[in-house]
Amino acid sequence: MINSTPLYDGLKRYIDENNINFHMPGHKGGHGILNIKEKPDFKDNILLIDQTEVSGLDNLHLPEGIIKEAEELAARAFRSDYTYFLVNGTTCGVYSMILGVTNHGDKIIVPRNSHRSVVGALILGGLWPVYYEPEVDFEKGIAVSVSLEKIEEAIEKNPDAKAVLVTNPTFYGTCSDIEAIAELVHKNDMVFLVDEAHGAHLPFSKKLPLNAMDAGADAAVSSTHKTLSSFTQSSMLHVRKGRVDVEKIEFMLRLTQSTSPSYILMASLDLARFQMEEHGEELIDNLLYMVDDFREKVSQIPDIYCFGKEIIGQHNVVDFDPTKIVINFRNLGVTGTRIDEILRKEYKIQVELSDLYNILAMGTVADVQENYDVLYNALVDISKKHKGQKEIRRIPDIKWETPYQALNPREALYEPMEMIDFEKSDGKVSAEIIAPYPPGIPAIVPGEIISKSTIENINRMREAGIKINGPRDQKLEKIAVIK
Ligand SMILES: Cc1ncc(COP(=O)(O)O)c(C=O)c1O
């Protein structure tokens, strides 16, 4: 219908449901950013500050005035040498830091389960990825950290790689030893990059895990919109001078960011930084009190488990971010995905994500105690109502062989492809990504040669009822390969 506004109406319907919100953006319906006591007028000015680069308002691509000042304050707060405001999501920061430290055709060491923005950067830069496998906690059904030994092995085998990238913390809050990794990477004359999308809050409390800049990273992206109070799509890139070409990174930012950057987003970054500098420690103390208390109570509910710091020391996890509330239903025998649906439909609670065993509720500085109480009561109820169900499957612990890369991701993208029978794809070059989820680590990515053992292992995962993400043909009877 011409006169309908389906997107706007859909959003309004969601707001009207009045759900309790444990998902991004971190400001949780504005609560986090509209309650900064020194800036009470922000709410009234949101539309009025939607401006452009007129005199006095500076220019994101050549900052000399108020944007420069705000970025310098952010650099101080996040303890970098340079901080750049991002308006095209953390994604454009990932692109810029990777493209800014590599040349076309270079090698870069990255996690096998990198976020798709990393894969995007590989494609844009025509880079050759050297993948390392993250550790997997099969009990919890999640990929966790990376060991120093795995990074060491990748560096030893690829001394010509330009950089090493680590995702830290993970979505599930587990942390690797990024300080030791930074030292190792630098000893080998490489650049250390951190995808800190899930850790923008870390620099603001000593009670939280070490942040990338303090650990010695040369560049890190942090999604202020995920874990702090800035608006969706706003984010920050932090850079340490010395090992990187700062001007090249700035060039890449001009390439990957809009020429009409939103002042609303940029102002929200300025406010989020201000809020954390002024009140961060107190806000985080309050949040930690709520999540710690919640975690303790939830773990006493029969068959439900919310892991915490006890994961430290297992699977090379060196620290844990308690604001990531991962609740495991494996013993209850109901999938996390089903619990996600039940929480929304029956209790008006929306969580950030769910998978086979878990749901992930995101805690942020915008939270209030009542919301944790409602979630706790819902879980008590669910544990009673759904006791003894046997929906759940086990994730097979498979040793995957590393496939041979015939083409890099960019080359694979531009080659003609065809669909063939999956069972007969042995020896062909894949044109698509196949990732059993959980644990979400790709079995095959574009450009890699499909082997018999990969086909067999994917079939084992399918037989175990594990979801296979990625293929065009959802049933995976056919697979796209390079012609
Ligand atoms: C680990 C990681 N890196 C990068 C990104 C990209 O962030 P954005 O969605 O802000 O572009 C995400 C988004 O979820 C992510 O989880």
Image (spheres, rainbow, N blue to C red):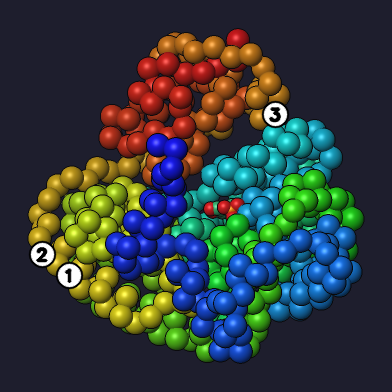
Q: Spatial distance from mark 3 to mark 1, Cα to Cα?
A: 49 Å
Q: Quadrant of residue 28?
A: bottom left
- Residue situated in front as seen by the camera: 60 or 106: 60
Residue at horizontal 57 percent and vertical 77 percent from the top: 44
Q: Which residue is mark 3?
A: 410
Where disc 3 sits, the SS reads helix
- Mark 1 and mark 2 in contact (Cβ < 8 Å)? yes
Where disc 1 sits, the SS reads helix
- Residue situated in front as seen by the camera: 177 or 409: 409
For the C terminus, the quadrant is top right
Residue 248 in the image, given as x and y percentages of width and height: 87, 51
Residue at horizontal 87 percent and vertical 60 percent from the top: 62
Disc 2 residue: CB within 8 Å of ligand 1: no
Residue 127 in the image, given as x and y percentages of width and height: 74, 35
- Mark 2 and mark 3 in contact (Cβ < 8 Å)? no
Q: Disc number at residue 380?
A: 1
**Vertical placement of residue 320 versus 101, above or below:** below
Q: Spatial distance from mark 2 to mark 1, Cα to Cα?
A: 7 Å
Three-letter code for the amino acid on which mark 1 is drawn? Val
**Number of numbered callouts drawn:** 3
Three-letter code for the amino acid on which mark 3 is drawn? Arg
Name of the residue lying farthest toward the front = 3
- Badge 1, how many Cα within 10 Å: few under 14, some, many 20+? some
Q: Is residue 403 left or right of residue 189?
A: left
Q: Which residue is mark 2?
A: 384
- Badge 2, how many Cα within 10 Å: few under 14, some, many 20+? few
- Badge 3, how many Cα within 10 Å: few under 14, some, many 20+? many
Q: Quadrant of residue 161?
A: top right
